[in-house]
Image: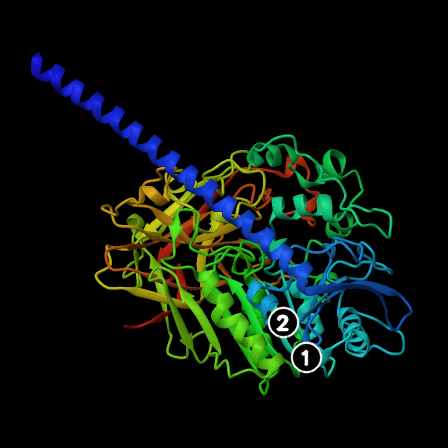
């Protein structure tokens, strides 16, 4: 009919107009991105010119107490009318470019600090690039050093002693900073610190590589991060050298298929590393939390800290979120007279040190959070302790509250006013602050190692940083993912502090992983912001990951001594997830998802207990039926801390 034809024509026209509009928006966004990139290149060129005009570069081979020499490049302001403090960064990633006439294109943790006037020192750590000695991954601290014994703390001490005695126009005060691996070296530098070290900022510091940082989370291997990192970082090469080794090419951008073909991990050397990566060979010999891993934990040594400390991290740091939270707790507890402060923003790994910090993935934060941090927190911290300029008056905890997108200041973390409560699982996919009133039995799913649940909705070869806020709608539609959610919230609910799942489970296998995800479900009428979303991901009913964490079930009673499950027996599995500071707004829902694979972010548990999971054989991998109980005598829940309105 004519009306039907007209409706069809109108529908087609709307599709065409929508396509044109989307294309136009994408073109605008693309042009905007190009414009931003061009402006950033121009800014970087200006910074590079400024450094060459205002700094003189020196290179030293700094002697250590055991006679080895560590390569150190130093940039000193040309203005000789005053003295300057030293900002010092130790890194395993090369202090390039090398040569006294080859200058870095940036100095310090921020441009603001560079323009304020500091001496900047960069050092290749022992055994890396142009430094002598043997490199050891996260070298253990030695509390009983004698004579020529060394560790990273002593190397930092000896270098600072050399710098204050030999670098021209320094004022005798030193600060250290570093992000990620350099954050570990910064934390080591504040242990038994040199008297000249006055201010230290470990940022996303590695603290424990088995419990929560980088390569393991609760004993589960973060596979793409470990393997792709060590494929380049861990390759043996001649010393000294100024060049990185060539990265091994997986040959595909599809990490799901690549790593599925690599499993089991006993194939890694045969297919990929070919015994060229020493740390992997050490790694697979230590599948449990033994002395190899314990000795590499920094937390036990953060005692009697003398310098002022600013520990920095991001709520969406895919690599070292655990480290900054627990470094703050350990330093604060073991150095009660110290000056230890804690900063957390809505950032991915190291994103506070670069860019503007307006968003991660499709989640926007309402302000330039990284710029705010650099100008209002980091800059006054170093100015106060290294130049005696003003009083920063920073709170002990300066944290960004996601969801509400507001900076909060507390006199402790977690906030003292936070209260303990629990979110309980119920039948029919319900989630509530009320415990189950009856024996509601269980929910179950079949976990198949051959078809693991993906961790990310897009194609990636590595550990994509935006997975930390990724949409979980697609995951909840799988039959091997359990979903529980609250009713629509009639008020804001703020969770501030640690999360601790306490699950009652059973399995038909003898080993299993359990992945718990806390999710913010947006209202069905949430409006899209097309100018910020060229991919046209719909934010209506978006299920934003707030926190997700795996637990390797064999470690439910001890990380040192793994135990098999008894098939079919109800067992309590309780573990810690990293803290959150998130407000679920009125009109949203709180969701919890539970699953047993998260691939390839986490390696696949064969679901058959074997002594060394890294050496599991193909025949060990088997399907298992997992049950999660929500009864009065087996009330599975997520223990949380809330801030009441």
Quadrant of res 69: bottom right
Residue 269 image position (x, y, % from top left): 75, 39
Q: Residue furthest top?
A: 1
Left-right relation of 389 to 610: left
Considering the image in quadrants, where does the N terminus appear?
top left
Discs 2/1, front? 1
- Check contact, mark 2 vs mark 1: CB within 8 A: yes
Q: Helix, strand or loop at disc 2?
A: loop
Q: Nearer the viewer, residue 555 or 261?
A: 261
For numbered disc 1, what is the local secondary structure? loop
With 534 as the anchor, is 111 left or right in this view?
right
Image spot of residue 194 (x, y percent)? 74, 80
Crowding around mark 1 (Cα neighbors within 10 Å: few <14, some 14 to 19, many 20+) is few
Residue for badge 2? 117
Residue projecting furthest to the bottom:
337
Give the residue displayed 51% in from the left and 84% down from the top: 391
> Residue drawn at (56%, 47%), measured in percent from left and top?
41
In the image, residue 298 above or below residue 5: below
Image vertical order of residue 6 relative to residue 518, above or below: above
Q: Is residue 568 visible?
A: no
Q: Give the mark nearest the N terminus, 2 or 1.
A: 1
- Image position, residue 183 (x, y; %): 64, 64
Give the x, y percent position of residue 515.
48, 51
In this figure, which residue is indicated by the disc labeled 1?
82
Q: Spatial distance from mark 2 to mark 1, Cα to Cα? A: 10 Å
Residue 137 can be seen, yes or no: yes
């Amino acid at each position: 009919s004519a009306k039907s034809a007209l409706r069809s024509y109108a529908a087609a026209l709307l599709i065409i107009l929508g396509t044109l509009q989307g294309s136009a928006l994408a073109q605008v966004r693309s042009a905007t991105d190009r414009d931003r990139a061009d402006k950033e290149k121009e800014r970087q060129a200006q910074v590079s010119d400024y450094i060459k005009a205002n700094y003189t570069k020196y290179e030293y081979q700094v002697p250590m107490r055991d006679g080895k020499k560590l390569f150190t490049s130093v940039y000193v302001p040309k203005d000789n009318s005053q003295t300057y403090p030293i900002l010092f960064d130790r890194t395993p990633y090369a202090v390039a470019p090398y040569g006294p006439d080859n200058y870095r294109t940036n100095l310090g943790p921020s441009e603001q600090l560079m323009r304020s006037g500091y001496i900047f020192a960069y050092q290749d750590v022992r055994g890396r690039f142009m430094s002598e000695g043997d490199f050891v991954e996260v070298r253990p601290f030695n509390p009983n050093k004698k004579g020529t014994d060394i560790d990273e703390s002593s190397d930092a001490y000896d270098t600072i002693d050399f710098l204050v005695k030999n670098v021209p126009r320094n004022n005798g005060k030193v600060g250290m900073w570093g992000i990620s691996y350099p954050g570990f070296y910064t934390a080591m530098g504040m242990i038994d610190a040199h008297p000249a070290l006055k201010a230290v900022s470990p940022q996303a510091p590695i603290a424990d590589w088995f419990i929560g940082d980088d390569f393991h989370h609760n004993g589960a291997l973060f596979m793409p991060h470990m393997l792709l990192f060590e494929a380049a970082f861990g390759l043996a090469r001649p010393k000294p050298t100024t060049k990185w080794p060539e990265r091994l090419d997986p040959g595909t951008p599809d990490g799901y298929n690549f790593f599925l073909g690599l499993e089991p991990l006993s194939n890694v050397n045969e297919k990929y590393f070919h015994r060229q990566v020493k740390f992997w060979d050490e790694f697979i010999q230590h599948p449990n939390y033994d002395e190899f891993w314990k000795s590499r934990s920094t937390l036990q040594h953060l005692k009697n800290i003398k310098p002022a400390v600013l520990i920095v991290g991001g709520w969406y740091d895919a690599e070292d979120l655990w480290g900054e939270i627990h470094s703050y707790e350990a330093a604060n507890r073991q150095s009660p007279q110290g000056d230890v402060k804690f900063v957390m923003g809505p950032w991915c790994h190291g994103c506070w040190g670069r860019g503007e910090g307006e968003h991660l993935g499709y989640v926007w934060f309402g302000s330039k959070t990284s710029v705010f941090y650099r100008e209002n927190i980091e800059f006054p911290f170093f100015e106060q302790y290294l130049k005696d300029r003003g009083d920063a008056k920073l709170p002990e905890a300066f944290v960004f509250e996601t969801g509400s997108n507001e900076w909060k200041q507390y006199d402790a973390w977690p906030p003292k006013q936070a209260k303990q409560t629990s979110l309980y699982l119920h039948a029919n996919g319900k989630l509530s602050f009320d415990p189950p009133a009856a024996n509601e039995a269980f929910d179950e799913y079949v976990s198949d190692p051959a078809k693991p649940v993906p961790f990310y909705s897009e194609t990636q070869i590595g550990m994509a940083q935006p997975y930390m806020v990724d949409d979980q709608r697609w995951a909840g539609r799988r039959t091997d993912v359990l979903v529980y959610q609250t009713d629509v919230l009639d008020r804001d609910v703020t969770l501030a502090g640690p999360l601790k799942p306490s699950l009652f489970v059973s399995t038909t296998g003898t080993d299993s992983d359990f992945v718990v995800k806390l999710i913010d479900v947006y209202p069905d009428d949430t409006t899209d912001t097309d100018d910020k979303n060229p991919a046209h991901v719909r934010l209506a009913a978006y299920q934003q990951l707030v926190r997700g964490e795996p637990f390797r079930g064999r470690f439910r009673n001890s990380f040192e001594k793994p135990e098999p499950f008894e098939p079919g027996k109800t067992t309590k599995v309780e573990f810690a997830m990293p803290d959150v500071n998130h407000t679920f707004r009125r009109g949203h829902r709180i969701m919890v998802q539970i699953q047993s694979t998260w691939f390839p972010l986490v390696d696949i548990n064969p679901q058959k207990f074997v002594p060394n999971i890294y050496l599991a054989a193909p025949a060990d991998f088997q399907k298992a039926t997992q049950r999660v109980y929500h009864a009065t005598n087996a009330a599975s829940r997520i223990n949380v801390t809330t801030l009441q309105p």
